[in-house]
Amino acid sequence: MSDEQIVKKYQAENPWGMSTTVDLKDCNPETIRSADKIKQFVVELCELIDMKRFGETTVVDFGDNPRVSGFSMTQLIETSLISGHFANQTNAAYLDIFSCKAYAPEKAAEFAKNFFEAKTMEFGVTFRK
């Protein structure tokens, strides 16, 4: 379905919220290892999908296990939360966008793919009821 169709379905069903998962593979290693770039991504994403940020973006680098070590990010938005984890070992990014306000999920996913220069991207949309 197109973004327009998803938003229409969302409005017709009137669920609690929309959740989009975005999995990015083979990202630019410099970008996913930069807290400043991750914060920039959040600001630009929120502007793109018309979400109002609540507070500053939190980005922390952690993980003793090389498989999962890397930055994790959270950003409260007035309608819920954007979060993500960036895995250094595989140069992958795993993003979640949850909001009770409708937005264009494919547009958001494509923006993430381009921002992090991922070679591949998969995304899924779930209506939370």
Image: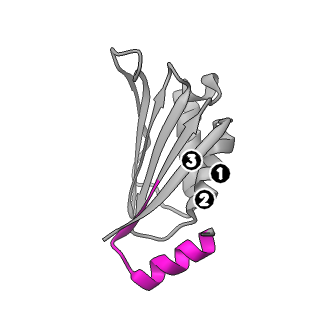
Q: Which mark is residue 26?
A: none
Q: Are marks 2 and 1 in contact (CB under 8 Å)?
A: yes
Residue 41 position by quadrant? top right
Residue kind at label 2, given as amino acid type: Glu
Residue 123 x/y as whole percent: 53, 51
Q: Which mark is residue 110?
A: 1
Residue 49 x/y as whole percent: 57, 61
Q: Which residue is mark 2?
A: 106
Residue 85 position by quadrant? top left
Callout 1: helix, strand or loop? Answer: helix
Identity of the residue furthest to the bottom in this view: 12
Q: Are marks 2 and 3 in contact (CB under 8 Å)?
A: no
Please give the name of the residue rendered at 68% of the width and 35% of the height, measured from the top-left corner.
119
Please give the name of the residue rendered at 51% of the width and 47% of the height, measured from the top-left corner.
22
Callout 3: helix, strand or loop? Answer: strand
In this picture, which residue range is highlighted in magenta? 3-20
The answer to whether 36 is drawn above or below residue 103 in the figure is above
Q: Nearer the viewer, residue 10 or 42?
A: 10
Q: Which residue is mark 3?
A: 122
Residue kind at label 1, given as amino acid type: Glu
